Image: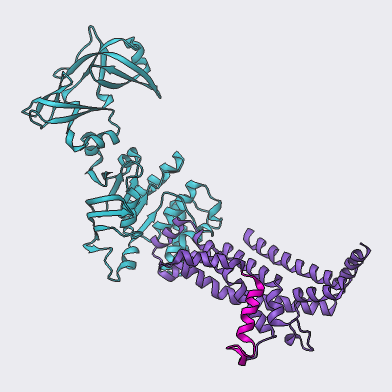
Chain colours: A cyan, B purple
Amino acid sequence: MIELVNVSKRFGDTAVLGGVTGRIERGEIFAIMGPSGVGKSTLLRLIGLLDTPTGGEIRIGGTDIHAKNGQSLRIRRMMGMVFQKPAVFNSTVSENIAVGLRFRGASEAVIRKKTEDALEVVGLSGYGERRARTLSGGEMQRVALARAMVIEPEILLMDEPTANLDPVSVEMIEELARRINRDLGTTIVLSTHDMYQGQRLAHRISVLMNGGFAQVGTPREVFTLPASRDVARFIGIENIIRGVVTAGGNGTSAIDVGGTLVRARSPFGEGEAVCLCIRSEDMRIVPAVGGKAVLSGNSLPGTVASIVPRGPFSKVTVDCGFLLSSVLSWKAVDALGIREGSRVVVSFAAESVHVVRAAQG
Amino acid sequence: MYEIIEGFLEAARLIVTLDPDVMAIAARSIIVSFTATISATLIAVPLGTTINFGTFRGKKSLINLIQTLYALPTVVVGLLIFLLISRVGPFGSLRLLFTPTAMIIAQTVLILPIMTGLTISALSGVDPVIRDTLYSLGATRLQFLTNIMKEARFAILAAVAVGFGRAISEVGAAILVGGNIMASSFMSSTRVLTTAISLETSMGNIPQSIALGIVLLVIALGVNLAITTVQHR
């Protein structure tokens, strides 16, 4: 439905987007994720015709939307947008929601009906006559969503719609986005720096980094098989270790990490520089003596370097020649009787190691 | 000291008894300045909008120039209009000199920069997200502009109030192109509050001056109150 063809955008001397290429399918929720300031909003603004790209093309249904062909208003009216900062017009809630309908010349009866329906959907029934400026941030954002929703756009662009909101409002906005997508078949393009929001909402996720999509895939793909070291770091994989493949073949490799051999599943051949991505949750820590090692896996002896509390868990970092972190419950830490300086064995399965090419980032 | 107190008492009497001379001058002041404010609004708001949303070379310099003209001396405007409409001037044949119309023209020119400038400030002060929202809701150019003006309505209203305040309180232009004439008919006279105060004071009619001064202040206060009430509604 939306095709991004080598889209670039510069602001003065600063290149924000340097050739984004991708495809957003009709009816999906597509999340654009990435660290703050990476150009997510810029990309959404380009799609929403609020700005023009420096290079490349954005096509909707095959039409270059930035071409000067008198189609601009028609294309703009296919889309609705919700912005990061909740902003309402200085009028009543109902009048706010009606604005887009008035632009399209809808009759008063239609406007009243749709406005009331929308108020109900976003859980603001009875708020119609209130001054919109007196609402809370979360309520304003729901008004903004209702306002974009009543014009029944084919594409709904949401630019970090929950970035400044409390958890309850976040949940409501997310549920509404899901409903709009499911019940109206609206294609939703959502930007977020919150990786869990992407995971919760999106059918597909793109990770925007260094001016382009570093990876596009289902949440499962992106979260289990990050395409590069940067993506792995962004999605919260804490153990990212550089190494060199010493023996490869049959899908298993031995990787040399500073003299220690780690077994992993990887397609890479001998001599290739790689990065190992291992989730803390997949790592087990057993006492140095008598512990049960993981079969066909890695058991690396080391010394506990630090134990840092993290909510109900503790992050235990072990020096095995290189640092590896694991997450254990407080109870588990107590049961193991470990403290800084304790000798332990870190074990993890070869399957838990995701290997990416080091050169990719 | 005694004279001043007496002046205030006499002023109170003139106001309370709705002295016909004082009331006529006050009414003329309001009519002239109100008309000038309306004319200036009709020019300044579209002009300010065009400048604010236009992209052209020298936009910043133009805005700087407009802001500099906020301090336009009233006598300079008076002189300029005088030269244009005096009998030997390019518009001399219209016979506008020493008429209320001349005063309206002079006051319009006088307050045009500040009203245009404040309109630009009002519009540029609208949250950029509001602008983006209007655009994303599918506004045409006209719908966009009218809605932005609607968002900025209170700030634009403040610009109008400032314009009116400057118009009704100026004396230099009014005296130069109006001439402070007290003729037999209401609309051929050009005596307004400020020019009358200036004349009466120079003639030693202190109570009359004080009364006119109070009326002027009350009008200014009334306009401000009206605007504040609207803004807080």
Pick the residue in front: B2 or A249.
B2
Which stretch appears magenta?
B72-93
Provide residue A348's location: percent of width, then percent of height.
Answer: 21, 21
Name the quadrant containing residue A210. Answer: top left
Residue that sits furthest to the bottom in the current view: B93
Question: Dividing the picture into quarters, in which one does residue A9 lie?
Answer: bottom left
Name the quarter where the C terminus of chain B is drawn.
bottom right
Q: Residue at x 69, y 67 (%)?
A: B223
Q: Quadrant of the N terminus of chain B?
A: bottom right
Query: Taking A110 as reference, is B221 left or right?
Result: right
- Give the main secondary structure, helix, strand or loop, of the magenta stretch: helix
Give coordinates of residue B168: x percent, y percent: 70, 72
Q: Identify whether A107 is placed above or below A36.
A: below
Residue found at x 54% / y 67%: B66
The answer to whether residue A166 of the structure is visible from this angle is: yes
Out of A254 and B9, give the one closest to the viewer. Answer: B9
- B222 on left or right of A346: right
Image height of A90 relative to A264, above or below: below
- Judge whether residue A105 can be spotted in this image: no
Q: Residue furthest top?
A: A289
Task: Using the image, determine if residue B155 lies above or below residue A142.
Answer: below
Q: Is residue B92 magenta?
A: yes
Q: How many marks?
A: 0
Q: Give whichever of A279, A261 is nearer the camera.
A: A261
Looking at the image, the residue that sits furthest to the left is A249
Q: Is residue A346 magenta?
A: no
Q: Position of residue A253 (x, y in %)?
A: 10, 26
| Whole-percent x, y for residue B221 in the image | 73, 64
Q: Residue at x 87, y 68 (%)?
A: B12
